[in-house]
Image: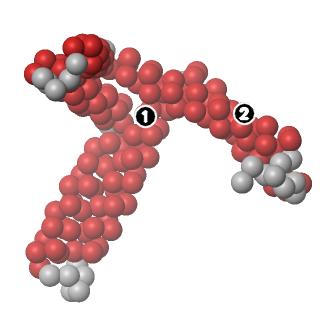
């Protein structure tokens, strides 16, 4: 490991403090963190939509590609605007869709565990158990979306806290870890 410069150490410490602040804010305001991420996704959809729409006017693309780009652009712009106008509804809708995905996945695992003759009895039981737990968690998220929001925000906050501690430690120690 080589010694880090003073400027590098300062940046590491600043990064660590910012990450710690984001982590603490995510713990205090979990809905705000998730809604912010959804709003950023809405902005990204708008940008992609306008880029696709602009690409649809390019004469370098075949007409079928121009039509597809125009359609993708219009749909992305509409979805982006809906997310920005109704961010809380978009957040809850996204969380419910994730819950539906977990429910479907869990049911699929239960079916696989039930019919997989190539697995031992113990492995089949584990697959079925994990499938049931996944399906139950999916149902909880579908019927109580705030559970999904809080769970996601909790893990985001833990990740930022860990990043902050890591950056602070590196900045204070003055060692480049790369």
Residue at image coords 20%, 61%: 72
User: Which mark is nearer the camera, 2 or 1?
Assistant: 2
What residue sits right under mark 2 in the picture?
A: 165
Count of picture labels? 2
Crowd rating for badge 2 (residues with CA inside 10 Å; few <14, some 14–19, many 20+): some
Residue at image coords 85%, 40%: 172
Q: Is residue 54 above or below residue 32?
A: below
What residue sits right under mark 1 in the picture?
A: 35
Residue 89 visible at all: no
Q: Where does residue 76 sit, x and y in percent of width and height?
A: 26, 55
Q: Is residue 77 above or below residue 14?
A: below
Question: Horizontally, is 97 left or right of 13 in the view?
Answer: left
Q: CA distance from mark 2 to mark 1?
A: 25 Å
Crowd rating for badge 1 (residues with CA inside 10 Å; few <14, some 14–19, many 20+): many
Circle 1: element type = helix
Residue 86 visible at all: yes
Front one among 133 and 122: 122
Q: Where does residue 10 sit, x and y in percent of width and height?
A: 83, 49
Question: Horizontally, is 158 left or right of 139 in the view?
Answer: right
């Amino acid at each position: 490991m080589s010694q880090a410069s003073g400027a590098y150490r300062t940046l590491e410490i600043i990064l660590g403090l910012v990450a710690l602040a984001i982590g603490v804010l995510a713990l205090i305001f979990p809905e705000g963190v998730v809604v912010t991420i959804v709003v950023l996704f809405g902005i990204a959809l708008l940008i992609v939509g306008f880029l696709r729409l602009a690409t649809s006017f390019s004469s370098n693309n075949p007409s079928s590609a121009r039509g597809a780009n125009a359609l993708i652009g219009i749909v992305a712009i509409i979805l982006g605007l809906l997310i920005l106008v109704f961010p809380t509804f978009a957040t809850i809708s996204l969380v419910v869709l994730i819950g539906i995905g977990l429910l479907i996945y869990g049911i699929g695992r239960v079916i696989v565990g039930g019919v997989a003759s190539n697995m031992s009895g113990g492995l089949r039981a584990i697959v079925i158990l994990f499938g049931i737990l996944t399906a139950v968690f999916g149902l909880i998220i579908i019927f109580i979306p705030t559970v999904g929001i809080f769970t996601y925000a909790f893990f985001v906050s833990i990740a930022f806290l860990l990043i902050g501690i890591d950056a602070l430690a590196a900045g204070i120690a003055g060692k480049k870890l790369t």
